[in-house]
Image (tube, rainbow, N blue to C red):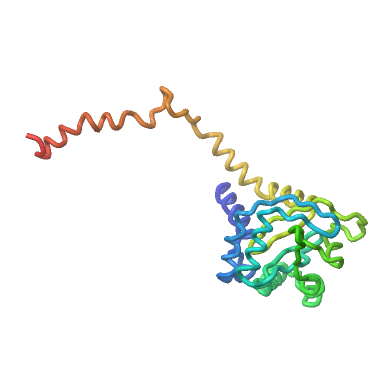
């Protein structure tokens, strides 16, 4: 029962993060984009209130996508303290998937959806130094609390399915904490198995019997076997 529950937790975790979520559709272009971004790691970036200094690996991905698809990236709101960078050619699919997720959670209102997620999106632009420019009407959305007068200086850039997320570092750390708590039963199950496994014996030691002279044993019997088969007189 515990193992089945742990496997279910892992499955739900990947369904939430992966491309096969039943909440929306996944076109070949969407899946291909997921594959392009999956190797990227979450990285901390600096924000001066107007520009975000992009890591080289992310900058290369953004530019490559723009050249290959002859399209831009769109910067949009995704929640308090969170912006997303979505390839223009996947924008409609992103919106459809997002609306499906909200409907599945009974949190969808056409008017609110347009006000929050569609109207504020802008074309992403970069300066000559490879810095992402955050429009004046967009950067207040990076605040976790609208009443907060300070702008976040440390952000985290990370891949999320077929797009990129730009979020405040504190929100990212909270997300990691929630993820650890969510996966705790699985980790406990995995550790309980490891605790009952026999200790591993380093290879090359006298106690290592993984290669118990198998070749030598075969070699001793080799001639006898062939004599029985009539290959030797």
Instruction: Tell me where residue 9 appears, x and y as whole percent.
Output: 61, 53
Image quadrant where one finds the C terminus: top left
Q: Is residue 24 left or right of residue 119?
A: left
Q: Residue at x 73, y 55 (%)?
A: 54
Instruction: Let me know if residue 131 appears in the view.
Output: yes
Q: Residue furthest bottom?
A: 111
Instruction: Tell me where residue 16 appears, x and y as whole percent.
Output: 64, 60
Q: Residue at x 30, y 32 (%)?
A: 214
Instruction: Let me know if residue 104 appears in the view.
Output: no
Q: Residue furthest front?
A: 128
Q: Foreground residue, 88 or 131?
A: 131
The count of marks equals 0
Q: Is residue 194 left or right of residue 51?
A: left
Against 79, residue 193 (above or below) is: above
Q: Residue at x 64, y 72 (%)?
A: 70
Instruction: Tell me where residue 17 appears, x and y as whole percent.
Output: 64, 58
Instruction: Tell me where residue 32 appears, x and y as whole percent.
Output: 57, 65
Against 200, residue 182 (above or below) is: below
Q: Foreground residue, 181 or 177?
A: 177
Q: Foreground residue, 122 or 70?
A: 70
Against 91, residue 12 (above or below) is: above
Tell me where residue 106 sits by quadrant: bottom right
Q: Is residue 161 left or right of residue 175?
A: left
Q: Is residue 207 left or right of residue 60?
A: left
Q: Residue furthest top?
A: 206
Tell me where residue 50 sits by quadrant: bottom right
């Amino acid at each position: 029962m515990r193992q089945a529950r742990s496997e279910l937790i892992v499955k739900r975790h990947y369904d939430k993060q992966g491309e096969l979520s039943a909440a929306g559709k996944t076109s070949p272009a969407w899946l291909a984009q997921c594959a392009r971004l999956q190797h990227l790691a979450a990285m901390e970036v600096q924000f001066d209130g107007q520009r975000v200094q992009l890591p080289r690996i992310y900058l290369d991905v953004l530019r490559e996508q723009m050249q290959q698809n002859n399209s831009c990236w769109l910067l949009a709101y995704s929640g308090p303290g969170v912006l997303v960078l979505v390839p223009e050619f996947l924008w409609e699919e992103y919106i459809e998937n997002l609306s499906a997720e909200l409907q599945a959670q009974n949190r969808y209102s056409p008017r609110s959806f347009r006000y929050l997620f569609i109207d504020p999106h802008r074309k992403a632009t970069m300066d000559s130094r490879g810095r992402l420019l955050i429009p004046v009407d967009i950067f207040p959305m990076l605040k976790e609390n609208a009443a907060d007068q300070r702008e976040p200086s440390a952000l985290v850039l990370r891949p999320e399915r077929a797009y990129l997320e730009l979020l405040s570092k504190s929100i990212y750390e909270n997300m990691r904490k929630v993820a650890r708590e969510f996966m705790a039963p699985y980790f406990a199950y995995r550790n309980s198995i490891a605790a009952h496994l026999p200790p591993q014996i380093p290879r090359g030691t006298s106690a290592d019997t993984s290669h118990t002279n198998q070749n030598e044993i075969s070699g001793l019997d080799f001639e006898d076997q062939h004599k029985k088969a009539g290959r030797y007189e």
